[in-house]
Image (cartoon, rainbow, N blue to C red):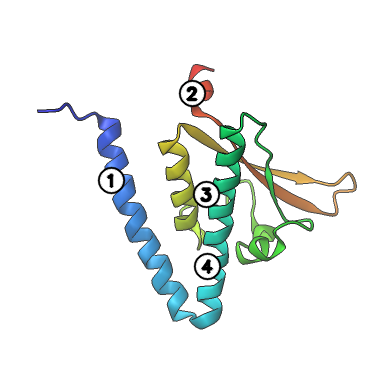
Amino acid sequence: MPATTLGAMLHITETCAKADCMKALERDAHLHGPCGERDLRQVQEFFDTVRTEFTMRILAGAEVIPVRLGAGHNNTVALILQTFRWTSDYDIRNPTHPYHAAWRVFDTWCVDNELAPVLRKFHDERGKEHWYELSVRSAINAAEA
């Protein structure tokens, strides 16, 4: 009988919860009609693109370039995710955020690939415009630190 670690059990639980969470998000988008479905599709496509870009750069041995949300980059997704309302205590990583399930899918991908997601807020020198940058770093290095 193979040994099952707590981490493996937790991963299975999180994966199941992720699927249920996405189903709820898809139902909610359907209730909001074509606009809600389009918004969800754009958020999912954003995270799919981010995963692809990060994967390609890592496999090529190149530096992972953060993906910007806002300030002229991925503005539609930034508006859908309402990044203008994010605070230090509330953003897409918060379980109460409407698109948290999409974050969980990305976060699970990171965990499965021994990566740690990094989401940081930046602003211009005048403090009039702000944006977020999403990147990943090695979870292996994070564990050693």
Residue 10: image location, x then y, percent:
29, 39
Residue that extends furthest to the top in the rendered view of this protein: 144
Q: What number is the disc on residue 41?
A: 4
Vertical order, 85 against 13 (above or below): below
Residue displayed at 77% across by 51% down: 130
Distance, label 2 to label 3, CA atoms, is: 21 Å
> Tag 4 or tag 1, which sits nearer the N-term?
1
Q: In this view, does 17 lie to the left or right of 123?
A: left
Give the amino acid type for the residue marked by disc 3 in the picture: Arg
Residue displayed at 50% across by 74% down: 37
Residue displayed at 54% across by 17% down: 145
Residue that extends furthest to the bottom in the rendered view of this protein: 33
Residue at numbered disc 3: 93
Give the amino acid type for the residue marked by disc 4 in the picture: Arg
Residue 142: image location, x then y, percent:
53, 24
Q: Is residue 126 left or right of residue 81?
A: right
Q: What number is the disc on residue 13?
A: 1
Distance, label 4 to label 3, CA atoms, is: 19 Å
Q: What number is the disc on residue 140?
A: 2
Few, some or many residues within 10 Å of mark 2 (<14, 14–19, 20+)? few
Distance, label 2 to label 4, CA atoms, is: 32 Å
- In-front residue for pair 102/65: 65
Give the amino acid type for the residue marked by disc 2 in the picture: Ile
Distance, label 1 to label 4, CA atoms, is: 25 Å
Vertical order, 61 against 20 (above or below): above
> Tag 3 or tag 1, which sits nearer the N-term?
1
